[in-house]
Amino acid sequence: MVKVTILYPNSLESRFDVDYYLEKHMPRSIELLGAALKGVSVEIGMAKDLTGGLPPFAAICAFTCESLEAFLTAFAPHASELQGDMENYTDARAIVQVSELRIENVKYEHTQARS
Amino acid sequence: MVKVTILYPNSLESRFDVDYYLEKHMPRSIELLGAALKGVSVEIGMAKDLTGGLPPFAAICAFTCESLEAFLTAFAPHASELQGDMENYTDARAIVQVSELRIENVKYEHTQARS
């Protein structure tokens, strides 16, 4: 499995609209990526981090797919809509990471993505 | 649920021993964090990323716990062992992010953590 992770670096100058991101952008992303998406997680940086400072990232989102090719095939037709929507919730420059998922173990009941 | 994410930035100068990390450090971390750990994921940056360059992170690991306090209570007694072990696999300065898990949906069978 491959994980495509989108990280939004935090800074005092940047804005990030958590409500829009969670209620509009992510549900639409999940809908458009459709069956190619084998898993998704979205987390929001907590103001109180381990050192009491600003969390390094405002948000981190991860899409799990069978392969990078499967992700790109699903994403390409919707790239302009999804990338164009980013200005509606942030002016941060997102970092994109492509990883191979090597260990995963979840012991709790999953919350449902709103798609 | 709270996710504590440890990210290892990549650079041409830094080293990261994937085998040691996956076969020694992570299984030991999972063992020591024990029941406080409700989920764990570990992914390794792929050499071929979206732009063909070095992936931003050599590895990303995420621990899911009921709360930050639950994580810290489990981690504190083992902090010196786990942090001391880091030099055995990397000289990168890890980034630690504490997040609130807001969306999670996994549609595939989980691989098992080796603990």
Image (cartoon, coloured by chain):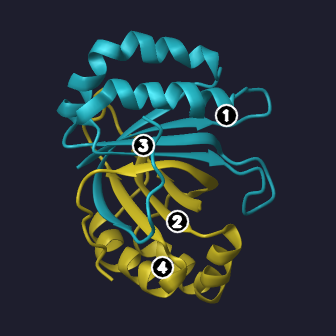
Chain colours: A cyan, B yellow
- Circle 2 — which element? strand
| Mark 3 nearby-residue class (10 Å; few <14, some 14–19, many ≥20) | many
Circle 4 marks a residue in which chain? B
Q: From the image, tell me which residue sits under label 1.
A: A18
- Residue B87 located left or right of residue A66: right
| Distance Cα–Cα, label 1 vs label 4 | 36 Å
| Distance Cα–Cα, label 3 vs label 1 | 16 Å
Q: From the image, tell me which residue sits under label 2.
A: B64
Judge depth for marks 1 and 4 and give the one in front: 1
Circles 3, 1 touching at the beta carbon (< 8 Å): no
> Which one is nearer the viewer's eye here, B74 or A54?
B74
Counting from the top left corner in percent of width and height, residue B36 is at 55, 80
Q: Amino acid at mark 4?
A: Asp
Q: From the image, tell me which residue sits under label 4.
A: B85
Circle 1 marks a residue in which chain? A
> Which one is nearer the viewer's eye here, A63 or B82?
A63
- Circle 4 — which element? helix
Q: Amino acid at mark 3?
A: Ala
